Image (tube, helix red, strand yellow):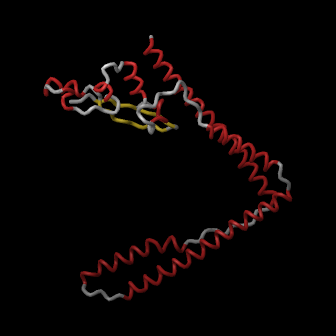
Amino acid sequence: MPFIVWVTRRTHGLTQLFLAQNACAGVSNLAQSGKPNGGQMPTGYTHKIDDDPNFTFEQFAMGCARAMGACVDMRDEPGSAEIPKAFEVPAWYASGVRQAEAHLREVEGMTVQDATKASAGEHFAAHEGWERRRRDRLATLERYRSMAILVEAWKVPTPDHEGLKRFMLEQLNLCLGPLRYESEEPKVVPPGLWLVRKRKAAGRAVVSAKESLERMTELVAGRNKWIADLRASLTA
C-alpha cells in the first residue's frame, strides 16, 4: 500500500486539505514486481529521480516544497520554475490603499454644491435602473399569469395526468411569489446626508484596504520565513 501524506495549506484565511501519494510507493512495489519502480508511474515531483541520476535530495525537497502553502502562488507555474528567494506582496494591495485614500480625499473635499450635483446624478441612475427592472418584472409576471390560466383551463386527458397538471402549477407558483415582490423605489437623499454617508463609506474603505495590506504583508513574511528555514536546513 502506498504511504499517504496529508498536507494542510492555508491561503487567504482558508484552510485547504490535500492528499498526496508518497513517491516511495514504487519502492514498496519493487520487491513484489521485480520491475524498476514496480510499474508505478512517477509523479510530477519524482520523475527526475527516474530521469536524472544526479538529482539531489536538496532538489527533491525544494521541488516538493512547491506543493506546500508557502508556495501556493506557484501552483500554476511550470515544473521547471524555481522558488524565488523571497515572495512579494502583490502590488494591487498597496494600490488599493492609494485608491481608497484618493477617493476619501475627493469626498472630503466636496462642497454641498458638489454633493448636490453628484447625489442627483446617482439618484437618476438608480431610479432609471429601478424602473427598467420593474418593467421587466411586470412583463415576466404577466407571462407567468397567462401560463397559469392556460394550465388551470387545461382538461387533462386521463386522471393519471392530474399529477402533471399539479406539477406544472407548482412550478409556476414557485416563481410567481418572487415576481409579485416589488423592491423599494430609490428615494432622493439630501445632499448633506449623502455627503456624510459617502465620507463614512470612504473612510471604512481606507481602513479595510489597509487591513488587507497588513494581513497579506504578514502572510508573505511567514511564507518567506518558511522558505528561508527550509533552505537553511538543506545547506546546514
Residue 224 location in percent, x, y? 53, 25
Question: From this viewpoint, which residue is outermost toward the top?
Answer: 236
Residue 8 quadrant: top left
In the rendered image, which quarter is residue 37 located in?
top left
Q: Is residue 122 above or below residue 161?
A: above
Q: Nearer the viewer, residue 27 or 117?
A: 27
Closer to the camera in the image, 6 or 76: 76
Say which residue appears at 55% left-offset and 29% top-offset: 87
The x and y percentages for residue 19 are 33, 35
Q: Relative to 19, is 121 on the left or the right?
A: right
Which corner quadrant holds the N terminus? Answer: top left
- Residue 129 x, y percent position in the rendering: 64, 68
What's the residue at 49%, 72% (across, down)? 177
Where residue 198 appears, x then y in whole percent? 74, 52
In the rendered image, the vertical position of residue 205 relative to residue 39, given as above or below:
below
Q: Residue at x 81, y 60 (%)?
A: 191
Q: Nearer the viewer, residue 133 or 51?
A: 51
